[in-house]
Image (spheres, rainbow, N blue to C red):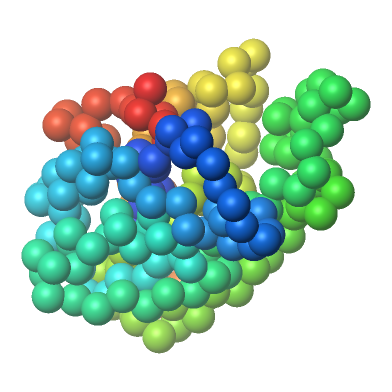
Amino acid sequence: MVQTTVYLIRHSVRFNSKKILQYNTNQNKTIKNEKIILSVEGEKRAEILSNEKELQNINVVYTSNCVRTLQTAKYLLEKQNLNANIDDRFDERRTGKPNDDIVKDWWLRQYTDENYKTEGGESQKEVRERFTEAFNEVLNANKGKRIAIFSHGYAITFFIMTWCKFKYNGDKDDMQFYFRNKKIFDKKINAPEVFKFEFDEYNKILNIENIEFSDLPYKDALGN
């Protein structure tokens, strides 16, 4: 049986924008977000990730259009002599205009209502549709291979909901996902974080699991 393995990898720890004293630019929010780099700690953790046994013998690598995903991938690319394919359909969800003061439960709503979004932002459904389109193209072009896709927290978790049920336990930083009634994730999302997908020759999903590494203890996107 021809089996395709895909690793969805959230980027490593990013640089904290609070350390930028002044940002004089006319660029829009999306472009500014795409240019966010990794922190020094994020670079170190990305290099550690590239040495993990689970992530060896990768055949092809894709990243979002954001600097921090390519920076996370570059150590694996260098170590395994690979090239990157950049696709903005793997980008993070556009958040839009903040409305915390109006919609108090906005965080939960984005997971329980696939059509919920803020002004100028994307819904869960919209993110999943573009992500799925790109993902299926990758699957069809790379049957039987080991694939690494470097993306973002919301984009990855929204995509996972194609097959997994989301459960909320009262803590927005402690998500639970179930695949075929088996709990595969019940913690805060790490930076980096790795989910492993296995598909048969017909692109039918066989298994999803969260891969943890003892030398990459929990850090959120800002290194906390």
Q: Nearer the viewer, residue 211 or 192?
A: 192
Q: Is residue 114 above or below residue 3?
A: above
* Residue at screen point 86% across, 49% down: 119
Quadrant for residue 26, please give it.
Answer: bottom right
Q: Nearer the viewer, residue 106 or 211?
A: 106
| Whether residue 10 can be seen here | yes
Is residue 37 shown left or right of residue 30? left
| Whether residue 181 can be seen here | no
Quadrant for residue 187, please give it.
Answer: top left
Q: Nearer the viewer, residue 138 or 165?
A: 138
Q: Is residue 204 above or below residue 120?
A: below
Q: Is residue 134 above or below residue 42?
A: below
Name the image quarter holding the C terminus: top left
Q: Residue 200: horizontal and vertical position, in percent?
A: 38, 70
Name the image quarter holding the N terminus: bottom left
Q: What count of labels does the image hold?
A: 0
Q: Is residue 12 above or below residue 3?
A: above
Q: Residue 125: horizontal and vertical position, in percent?
A: 74, 55
Residue at the far top in the pictured view: 170
Is residue 65 shown left or right of residue 39? right
Quadrant for residue 154, please give it.
Answer: top right
* Residue at screen point 38% across, 34% down: 190
Residue at the far bottom in the pictured view: 141
Q: Residue 188: horizontal and vertical position, in percent?
A: 45, 26
Q: Residue 143: horizontal and vertical position, in percent?
A: 34, 80
Is residue 161 shown left or right of residue 152? right
* Residue at screen point 26% across, 69% down: 146
Is residue 171 shown left or right of residue 61? right
* Residue at screen point 57% across, 56% down: 32
